[in-house]
Image: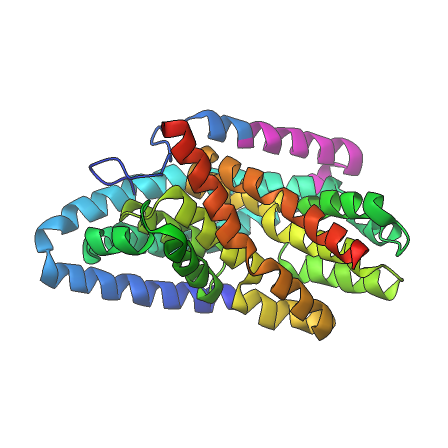
Amino acid sequence: MNILIGTILLWALALLMLRRLKTQAPESLPAVYARGKSTFLFMVPRIFIGLIGAGFLAELLPVDQIDRYFGANSGLAGVLLATLFGAATPGGPFVAFAIGAAALKAGAGWAPLIAYVTSWSVMNLNRSIAYELPFMGRRFLLFRSAASLPLPILLGAWLLLF
Amino acid sequence: MQPDPPSPGSSTPRKLIDGSLIFITALAVAGGAGVWWLKGGDKFREILLIETGFAVMLLPKILAGILIASCLPLLMSQRRIQALIGPESGLRGLMIATLAGVVIPGGPSVTYPLTLGLMSAGADLGAGVALVSGWVLVGLNRTLIWELSFLPPEFVALRVALSLPAPVLIGWAVRRYINGAAR
């Protein structure tokens, strides 16, 4: 359902922009279509392979064991482990937040939890492979990931200290 | 989405088969073999079917995203985008890019094409990274709809407050590194 609404909204925006372009600069339309077509052909195999690959990897990861390592006394080791699990957690936001909520109920501390949620937000292998790599390219993903890597650990450490 | 003069900051390869395609194919094959071996052929086929179906449903959305990203650089004045979030836009540009990421209401198939379109229109890599970071870290949609329904509000508030400066810092670090490497 969500995907349908999103698709309709996006198409409305795309058609609106195409119409504006038609009145503003009609001579550029063939180039837009040609570029759109080549980009689409470029994307299609990547989207299929990326999503299928992410699906396989998700099946192989032991996500059901995550809450076991989240203990309130786990300290920096817990934060590091939570960072690792956050990056590896597959699926949409509901999966990561549901796991976080379950871990909290099972007695997890805020420090590993913030490391987990933050790591899932910035690293998220699933999204990186299925979307970011095909859309943005390797350079963008590498730079963004390298600059983001310290954040989950820093936030977790911050909560351990204060 | 590559404009005629090569877009600043964008490195998207145009070759149909390139390193990143080989990389994700190798990952998918390894993952598939692992699932087949550990969980059996039925599980393998089930995942293959589900993900293929999902990808098919996603295609119209991606096509629309690509059209938007292709139109965007032509509809917006290159000079204005460059002034707002270009390489010389300073801290203010990174804040604007972060804010854009925070308010974008869509998922990855909206945000990435949009970022690519803005980068083709003159945004630099640092601003692009700040935008995506703002979206993944403190995106309104995800925080309000998903995170708040699962986690305690005090935790969410603390996480958002601590994460808020991060996209600007991350974008700044990327920009600084690139400038340093160019010199």
Residue A151 is at least partly visible in this image: yes
Nearer to me, B16 or B80: B80
Q: Is residue B77 above or below residue A16?
A: above
Is the N terminus of chain B in the top left, top right, bottom left or bottom right quadrant?
A: top left
Q: Residue at x 30, y 56 (%)?
A: B84
| Quarter-of-image position of residue A15 | bottom left
What is the magenta segment's predominant secondary structure?
helix
Nearer to me, A11 or A70: A70
Q: What color scheme is it?
A: rainbow
Is the C terminus of chain B in the top left, top right, bottom left or bottom right quadrant?
A: top left
Q: What percent of the width, then of the height, locates residue A113?
A: 76, 57
Q: What span is in magenta?
A: B24-44
Q: Along the horizontal axis of the image, is B157 left or right of B80?
A: right
Q: Along the horizontal axis of the image, is B19 left or right of A16?
A: right
Q: Is residue A28 above or below residue B10?
A: below
Nearer to me, B131 or B89: B89
Does the segment drawn in magenta span residue A35? no
Q: Residue at x 33, y 53 (%)?
A: B85
Q: Along the horizontal axis of the image, is A145 left or right of A74?
A: left
Q: What percent of the width, then of the height, locates residue A46?
A: 47, 38
